[in-house]
Image (cartoon, rainbow, N blue to C red):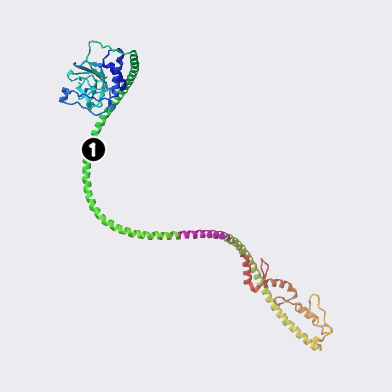
Amino acid sequence: MSVLTSRLMPPLAVRGRAASLVPVLDVIAVCFQAEAGSRVPSHPRTPTMEETIEDPPTSAVLLDHCHFSQVIFNSVEKFYVPGGDITCRYTLTQHFIPRRKDWIGIFRVGWKTTREYYTFMWVTLPVDLNSESAKQEEVQFKAYYLPKDDEYYQFCYVDQDGVVRGASIPFQFCPENEEDILVVTTQGEVEEIEEHNKELCKENQELKDSCVSLQKQNSEMQTELQKKQEELETLKSVNKKLEQKMKEQKDCWETELLQLKEQNQKMSSENEKMGVRVDHLQAQLSTQEKKIEKLVQEVQDKTEQLEHLKKENGQLFLSLTEQKEHQKKLEQTVEEMKQKETAAVKKQQELTDQNLDLSKRLSENKILYDGLQREKETMQKKNELLKSENNRLLSYMGLNYDSLPYQAPTSSQGGARQNPGLVYGNPYSGIQESSAPDLLSIEPCPTCTADFADDIFDHTLEQHKPALYLNCPICGKTFPAKEKQIFEDHVFCHAL
């Protein structure tokens, strides 16, 4: 843009009134705002009367942080004639609130900060500050304080914080000539100028559209700013309340601080006492640590013993399991033995009953045996008497019993033998046979050598044998009656 301005300066220097060059100034007005850092004023400014009284508020805020759309300058000419007063007309937007220290300054195009003003005038506050509509205001600059050169200048509205709120298009202070100056140019230069003029018109239109969009954004931001200011006022009131509470809290904290200082002094004295106790406790701690080391060693030993015991416990558990299995088998065996014992006891009871029966029969047989034994003795005595009588009779007859040639045959029933010593027989044989028939039919017992008569031998012997022997009811083994205890033990062993 600087190159374009330098190319257009020759025709501007001669102040041609060609209508085709008018849009160029509008473009330059916007472009100079973007080139604010490229030009620095080289001429000293003339101080105004107001500056001798009080300097306006300024700041070092750069252009990037300024809001140029809050104040709009109206009817700004492109050229002003030197030596005359200038009236600056401007409009305050509805979202902008002016303040007492706001001012309007004339700045040379290319300024960087608000401190580089040439001259300024204080603004007049509108009558109705609370009105939300746009406000038309104006201020007049005296000719004495205006620049005398032909550089480009512009109006800037600066608030009391030193922030620019609006800027005008650039203008010049140039005297008017009564005669038109004839500019002689070639056709090629004219065509080039017209081509540049078209490009500048196009750029100017784009910049205007961008300006409208920026104004719209600025309006929205002003609305948001108003809300923020309201929030700021609310926050200020809240801050004031918080400051009051903070002050009260501070007084409370100071009181607590004094109390804490007193407690600190007490704690210091207690701390000294605790230091002595800490030394004592440290000594105890070292002693306890040694004991703990010993205990740890013991714990390790116990742990090893525990592992060993666990292994033994595992082995014992296996052994116990085997013993339980063996115990189950033994219980089964005991149960079987109990069943056998019950059967044996039942069998023994039966045998005992049989034994009692046999004992009773034995007693009866013994009584019978005693009666028979007495009868046998009586018969033996009678037999002896008969023998002696028989011998006497033989001797009386002059015969010897042993020398007799004839002996009577023995009867098939086992009767008494005939006396062979008598030729004609024994005259007392009838008497002997009738009086003592049992003496010839007595048989001895094969077991106890006792004699029994022939007619009672079979019956008495059968009863006599069971009384003399005991037979095992299980295996059939025979025991003498005298060995009754051995017989009972033998039967009991079968029950086991």
In the rendered structure, does residue 324 fall within the stretch colored magenta? Answer: yes
Instruction: Specify the farthest residue to the top.
Output: 179
Assign the magenta stretch its main secondary structure: helix
Q: Quadrant of residue 231?
A: top left
Does residue 456 appear anywhere in the picture? Answer: no
Residue drawn at point x = 73 percent, y = 74 percent = 457
Q: Position of residue 315 (x, y in %)?
A: 51, 60
- Decide which of 391, 214 is in the foreground and name it: 214
- Decide which of 94, 425 is in the foreground and name it: 94
Q: Position of residue 133 (x, y in %)?
A: 26, 19
Classify mark 1: residues with Cα within 10 Å, few (<14), some (14-19) or many (20+).
some
In the rendered structure, does residue 186 fall within the stretch colored magenta? Answer: no
- Side (left or right) of 478 relative to 206: right
Q: Is residue 159 above or below residue 337?
A: above
Residue labelled with disc 1: 246
Q: Position of residue 479 (x, y in %)?
A: 66, 71
Does residue 323 appear anywhere in the picture? Answer: yes
Q: Position of residue 186 (x, y in %)?
A: 32, 13
Mark 1 falls on what kind of element?
helix
Residue drawn at point x = 33 percent, y = 60 percent = 287
For the C terminus, the quadrant is bottom right
- Decide which of 423, 285 is in the foreground and name it: 285
Q: Quadrant of residue 413?
A: bottom right
Q: Quadrant of residue 237?
A: top left
Residue extent of the magenta highlight: 305-329
- Side (left or right) of 400 relative to 163: right
